[in-house]
Image (cartoon, coloured by chain):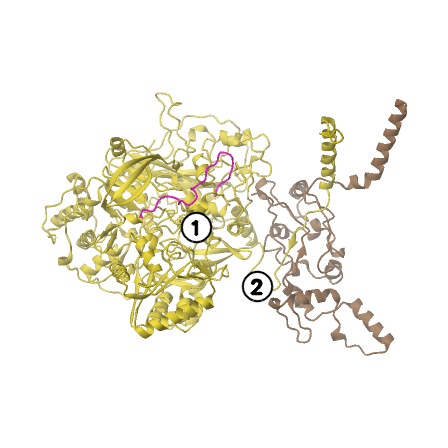
Chain colours: A yellow, B brown
Amino acid sequence: MDSRFASDRRDFLKWAGFSLTSLAVSGCGRAEEHEAVPFLDQPEEVKPGRATWYATTAPGCPSGCGVLAKYRDGRPVKLEPNEGHPLTGTGTCAACQASILGLYDSQRLQAPRMTGQTSTWDAIDAAIAAKLKAIRATGGAVRVLTPTVHGPTRRRAIGDFLAAFGDARHVMYDPVSSSALRDAHARVFGRAAIPWMHFDRARVIVSFDADFLGTWINPVGFARDYHAGRRLEGKAGEPFSRHIQLESWLSLTGCNADERHAVMPSERIEILAAVAERVAQHAGAEVPWPAGNAQTRLAPAVLDRMAAALTEADPGTSLIVCGANHPAEQTIAAWLNHQLGNYTAGGTLDLAAPCNHRLGDDAMLAALLEELEAGRVAALFIADANPVYDLPGGERLAALLADSSKLPLAVVMSGSLDETASAAPYVCPVPHALEQWDDGEPRGGVITTTQPVIRSLGATRPFVESLATWAGRPADARSQMQAAWRKDVLPRAAAGTSFDSLWHRAVHDGYTQLSTPAAATPAFDASKVIRRGSGPAGASQSLALVLYTKVGVGDGRGAHNPWLQELPDPVSKISWDNYAVLAPDRARTLGIETGDVIALDAGGKRIELAALVQPGVPHDAVAVALGYGRAGTDRFANVGPEWIESTPTVAEKSTVGVRASGLVALDGPYRALDGRAVTLEKAGARHELASSQLHHSLEVPKHLAGPNTDPRPIAEAVTLAAWREDPAAGAHTPHPKKPLWDPDHPYEDHHWHMAIDLSRCTGCSSCVIACQAENNVPVVGKDEMRRQRDMHWIRIDRYFDTDDASTTAVHQPMMCQHCDNAPCETVCPVLATVHSSEGLNQQVYNRCVGTRYCSNNCPYKVRRFNWFDYPRDDTLENMALNPDVTVRTRGVMEKCTFCVQRIQEGKQRAKSGGRPVRDADVQPACMQSCTAQAITFGDGNDPESGVSARMQDPRAYRVLEDVGVEPSVHYLRRVRNREKGHGHG
Amino acid sequence: MPRHVRLIVLALAFVGVLVTLWPRLAASRIPGNHQGYAPSQPIDYSHRLHAGELGIDCQYCHFGAESSRHAGIPPANVCMNCHRSVKVGMGEKLAAEDAAKAEGRRLDPTTLISKQLQILYDHVAFDPKTGSWDAAKGQGPIRWNLIHRVPDFVYFDHRAHVRAGVDCQKCHGAIESMERVRQYSNLSMGWCVNCHRDAHANGIKGQPASPSIDCSACHY
C-alpha cells in the first residue's frame, strides 16, 4: 500500500473523534421537517385524531357478525361488536376481527383481467355483453354460482339478471355444506329450511359432530345463546344446560362439553337410532324403523343416561344437533327433536323464522357440475366463491372453466386472484365488504346492512353493479339496494313505516327487525325418515378420515390473512399448518410421532402431511383440517424476520399446509366431510409443526418437580353439583404467605382489575386477534413461533381434562396479570417497567434497554420481547395499524397494557361528560370482542362495577396465588355439568 | 519552539475557538429539542393579526382542541368562512387606494385580492365573482410545515389540558403576538412533568387539579 495513504491506529482514532464530535454538534441542528396537511373541505363529523363508528356487517366469518367499523383519520382501523345486533350482539369471531387486514391486502385484485391479462372495465363489459347477446339469441343456459346469498339486494340483482334468459338458474353452495340438514327438513316437514336453533332455551344439548361453538353455521350467535342458557351469576337454582358432545375429532365445542364421547363417524347414525329408540320407548311411541338393530361400541349405560336426560327435560327444552351432511342422520335427529317437542312454539327449534346462514344445495351443485361436464352451459358466473379450491373435483372444474369449447363464457367475480379466478378467462374484481353497500337476511325477519367505510382502494366493482351493467341497466349498488328494499323489505315492515325512516334507521343501526308471520309448525311425516345401516363407506373400514375446519382460516377464506394463519389453533395450539390428528394409542401402534410426515390415501387421492398425536380422537379416525393449501400462500415465505438462522415460513412455490378438500367424500350429491376410508403410511420425512402448546408454561417442569410436588392450581374446575352445594367448592387453599412489600400503594382513584369466567371462555380466540388488531402486535412467522417468540399479548392456554372415557379441555386466557407486587418491576435496572397509581403495570418502551430480566422474573410468562424489527414493509397493510398505540422497535419488551389507550380515552370521555368513569367507558379489546362475555374489566375501587361483582364471586381465584404477587386478574372457576368430576390441577 | 510557548499558543488557540463557537455552543441542546423552530409556511399566515389584533378565539380555527387529541390545523373551509368575503388586508387596500388616487383612476375595491389569500384561493378554486369555491377543482391540499411535534411514543391529548383550563399560551407562548409561529416550549418530558407536578401542588388558576405523572399517562 502507498505509504502516503497509510493510516495508523492513532489517525483512525483522531478521525473517529472528529467525526463523532461533528455529528454530535450537527445533531443539535434543525428539526426534521414534517408536514401537516389538513382537509380543504372537512366533513363536519370528521375530526383528525377522533374515531367515528359506522354500523356494518363483517366479512370473512360464517356468522356475519354485526360490527361497528372504527373509522379513524380517513380509514377503518378496527371492527368492534355492534352491541344491539339481534344475532351476534355481544361479540365477534376471530375471522371477523382479522378481516380488517383483508381490506389492506396488497394482493387484492385491482383491475379486471381478460384471458390472463390486465384489462379495463369497458373492454371486459363489451366482451361479456357481446357473448351474452349471442347466448340470448341461441337460448343457451346461463348459471350463476355463489355461496349462500340471503340478502334482498343480491337476490333481486341475480333474479333480474337471469330473467332475461330462457334457461337460467342460480346455484348456491357452501364450502362446508349443511345441505342435508335443509333437505331433511324438506323431507319430513315439507319445508326446505334450517330451523333457528335456540341454544338459550335448551336444558339438554346433544351434539353429534356439530362444532356449534367454533365453526358450525353461526358460531357467534350460537355461543351467545349457549351461554345465556348456562348462568352461574344468580341463585344456585338457575337453569344450567347439560351439553353432551359425540364427535369423531376433538372440536372446540367438544372441549367445552359437559360430557364428551369420541365416536366413529359410522357409529353416529347407530347412536342416534339407539337414543331415539330409548326415547320412543319411554314415551310409549314407536320409531319409524325396525328397532333394535343399532350397533355401537358406546356403553348401553351411556345411551340410557343420554336418553334419560332428554326425556327428563320438559318438552321443547332439549336440542339435538347433528353436523354431518348425511340426510339419514339428519332425518333421525329431526324425528328425535320432533318427538321431544322441540319444534313446538317456544321450543328450541324455530322453522317460522329459519336460519339462512347456509342455503347451499348440494343436489343443484352436482347437477351444475354434470351440466358443465356435458358442455350444456353457455355462461357461468361465479361470484365470491372459490369452487376450484372448495370442491373435491376442483381440478376438473378449473379445466372446464378454461375450456371455451365446453363453456363459452366463464366469468369469475372475486376479490383476489384465487384458484378459481386464475382458471377463468374473465375476472372481475369485487370490492371488500368494507368498501361496498350490501345487505343480508341471516335469519328470517332480521335484515342486516353493510355500508362502505372507505372508498374502494382499487378499480373494483360490486357484484350487483356488474350484473346490472351486463343486463343493460347500469345502477350503483346503493340505489339497487334502495330499490330492492322498497320492493322486498318495506312491505314487510310495520304498517305506516316510511321508506326513509326504515332506511336511515337500518343503516344507522346496521340491522332492522321485521315481524315474521306466526306459522304453525308443519306436520311431521315420519314415513320420510331414513334409517340406513351405518355411514356411507361402511363400518368395516380400518381408518376413517374426518375433515374439519379451524376457527382461524376456516374453510380457506382466512388463508391469506397472516393474523389467522399465526393464530394458534385453540385445540392443538399449532399455527401455520394443518396436520393429521391421530389418537395416542393408534399412533403408538403405528410407530408415529408428532411431526412425522404421513401419507393418507383415499381411493387414489393422496396427501402428505405431518401427524399430530392428540387425545380425544377415536382410535380408528384421522382428522385433517380443511382451509389449508391455498394457492399463493407462499407469499408468507418471508413474513417473519430474516436473520442467519431463520427458515422461511413456507417454501417457495409451496403452500401453507396441505389442501384436503380433494378428499371430501360424496354421499350421493352430498359433500360429506367424514366417513371416507383412508389408508395411512409413513412417508419417512419429518415436518416441524409450530406448536405453542408448551410455550410459556406455568407448570413446574417434570425434571424440576419433586416427587411429592402437587400440580399447581392454574385452571380450576368444579362440577355443577359440587358448586350448587358450595359455591366456593374446588377452591385451593393457598399457603400462608407473607407479603414481600408493605401495602403502601393507596390506589386512591381507580384500581383496574379484570375477571375472567372460565365457565364462559370457549377458547374461540376472538380476543387474541382483537388484541392483535388493537395493539399493533406483529406477525413473526412460523420459525419464530417455533422458537417460542410469538408476540401475542394474550394467549389461550389449553389444559386437557382427560380420563379413560373422554377428553375435554379448559381454556384459560392468559395475559399480563398487572400484579400489585409485580416481580418484573423490581428487577428492571432502568425502571422501564413501573407501577402506576391506578394499579397498572406499565411498560415504557422508550426506556427499555432489553435486558429481559422482567420476562425471566414473570411467573405467568406473559412478557414478549422484540427480537427484531418485524417486517412492516407493506405500507398498505400498515394502514391497519392503530394510530393510538406505539409500534415497538427491536430490543424492547412489551406485554398486555390492559389497553391503556382505551383507559385514557374512557377517562377523557367521562371527564367531558362531567361524570365518574363507568364500566362502559373502558372496554379492553379482548373483553369487547368476547361473545361469551367471559372477560370483565373495570375499576375494582368502584363497588358497583361489574368486575367488583365478579371478584366477590365465590368461584373467583387468582392464578398462582401462593406466589404472593397479588395479581389484578381474577379467574372464575370452570363449572361443568357432570356427575362425577375432577378439577384440573 | 520552547515547550512553554507551545503551551501558551495552544491555550490561546483553544480560547479563540471557544469564543468563536460560543454562540453555536450556547444554542446547542439535546437532540430532539426544537425550541424556537419557526419554519416558513406556504401562506404567510399571521397569528398576530388574527388572534391578537382581531381577537379571534383560538378554538374558532383549532376546533379540535376541546374534543380531540389534536387541536388540528384548520381546514380551508374554516378560512373560507371569512375569506369568502374578506379578500384583502386593510394595509394593502389603503395602499392600493392611495396609488389609484395618485394616478387619478377609479378603483373597484371588490377586485382587490391579497397575494397571500390568492394562494388559499388557488387551493380551493375560489371564484371571487360568484363567491363560490370547490376544493375538488383546486390545487390540492395546503401542505403546512408542522412545528409542534412530540415523538411517536408520546400521546399528548389537547382535550384534557383545554378542559382543565390550561391557557394555550402556557405551552405555546404569546402566540397572539407572533407574526410567524415559533415553538415556544422545549416539549421535553421534564418540562411536561414539572408542569404536572406544579399543577398538583398549586392547582390550575386556583382550581385544584390532579394531573397524572404515571408513565402511561403519555406513553402507550
Q: CA distance from mark 1 to mark 2?
A: 28 Å
Residues at discs 1 and 2 both on one chain: yes
Q: Is residue A646 magenta?
A: yes
Q: Mark 2, residues whose alpha carbon is within 10 Å: few (<14), some, or many (≥20)?
A: few
Whether residue A963 sits left or right of residue A2 in the image: it is left
Name of the residue lying farthest toward the front: A2
Could you tell me the amino acid type at mark 1? Gln
Say which of marks 1 and 2 sits in front: 1
Task: Please tell me whether residue A215 is drawn above or below residue A371 in the rendered image.
Answer: above
The foreground one among A207 and B67 is A207
Q: In this picture, which residue range is highlighted in magenta?
A: A639-660
Task: Please tell me whether residue A494 is drawn above or below residue A263 in the rendered image.
Answer: below
Identify the subunit bearing mark 1: A
- For residue A750, say whether it is visible: yes
Asked which secondary structure carries label 2, the reply is: loop
- For residue A258, say whether it is visible: no
* Percent coordinates x, y for residue A926 in the rendering: 44, 45
Marked residue nearer the N-terminal end (1 or 2): 2
Identify the subunit bearing mark 2: A
Q: Which residue is mark 1?
A: A97
* Percent coordinates x, y for residue A31 in the rendering: 70, 47
Asked which secondary structure carries label 1, the reply is: helix
Magenta segment, prevailing SS (helix, strand or loop): loop
Q: Which mark is residue A43?
A: 2
Whether residue A520 sits left or right of residue B68 in the image: it is left
* Percent coordinates x, y for residue A732 in the rendering: 36, 30
